[in-house]
Amino acid sequence: MPFETQDNQILYTVDGRTLARVTFPKTGPDTVDIDHTFVDPSLRGQGIAGQLMEQTAAALRRTGRRAALSCSYARQWFERHPEWQDVLDTGAGA
């Protein structure tokens, strides 16, 4: 899969076009807010958003960061994946 991890976002890019993205801007020294998930209509229903979220959770775990969740998709995904609860910033209302 053509995923690209950057500091505060993960992109799914094909032929130079970003077709999916999750953004998680920094909110503190070791915290971020997963605030937006987008998947192009041509890719919906293929599990791309879930893959983006799993890659995001893994990146946060690797870097020792924790996340608040203002994105509704992110909240739903983390509810369904308790194995990633350790990356949530529970003090931020996650």
Image (cartoon, rainbow, N blue to C red):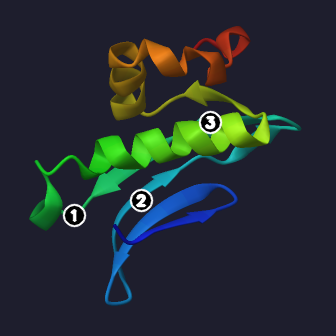
First-in-chain label (1 vs 3): 3
From the top left corner, tell me how far across and down residue 59 is, in percent: 63, 45
Task: Specify whether 44 is left or right of 15.
Answer: left
Q: In which quarter of the image is residue 90?
A: top right
Q: Is mark 2 on a helix, strand or loop?
A: strand
Q: Residue furthest right?
A: 29
First-in-chain label (2 vs 1): 2
The residue lying at 36 percent from left, 29 percent from top is: 72
The residue lying at 57 percent from left, 57 percent from top is: 9
Instruction: Say if 63 sits above or below 42 in the image.
Output: above
Q: What residue would you read off at disc 2? A: 21
Amino acid type of the residue that numbered disc 1 sits on in the rendered structure: Asp
Could you classify mark 3 by the number of other residues whose Cα lies within 10 Å: few (under 14), some (14-19), or many (20 or more)? many
**What distance separates the C-alpha of mark 1 from that of mark 3?**
22 Å
Q: Is mark 1 on a helix, strand or loop?
A: loop
Pick whichever, 36 or 50, lies toward us. 50
Q: What residue would you read off at disc 1? A: 40
Q: What residue would you read off at disc 3? A: 33
Split into 4 quadrants, where in the image is the N terminus? bottom left
First-in-chain label (3 vs 2): 2
Task: Specify whether 46 is left or right of 64.
Answer: left
Amino acid type of the residue that numbered disc 2 sits on in the rendered structure: Arg
Q: Is mark 3 on a helix, strand or loop?
A: strand
Pick whichever, 53 or 83, lies toward us. 83
Instruction: Say if 90 sits above or below 24 in the image.
Output: above
From the top left corner, tell me how far across and down residue 75 is, in percent: 41, 23
Could you classify mark 2 by the number of other residues whose Cα lies within 10 Å: few (under 14), some (14-19), or many (20 or more)? many
Pick whichever, 28 or 52, lies toward us. 52
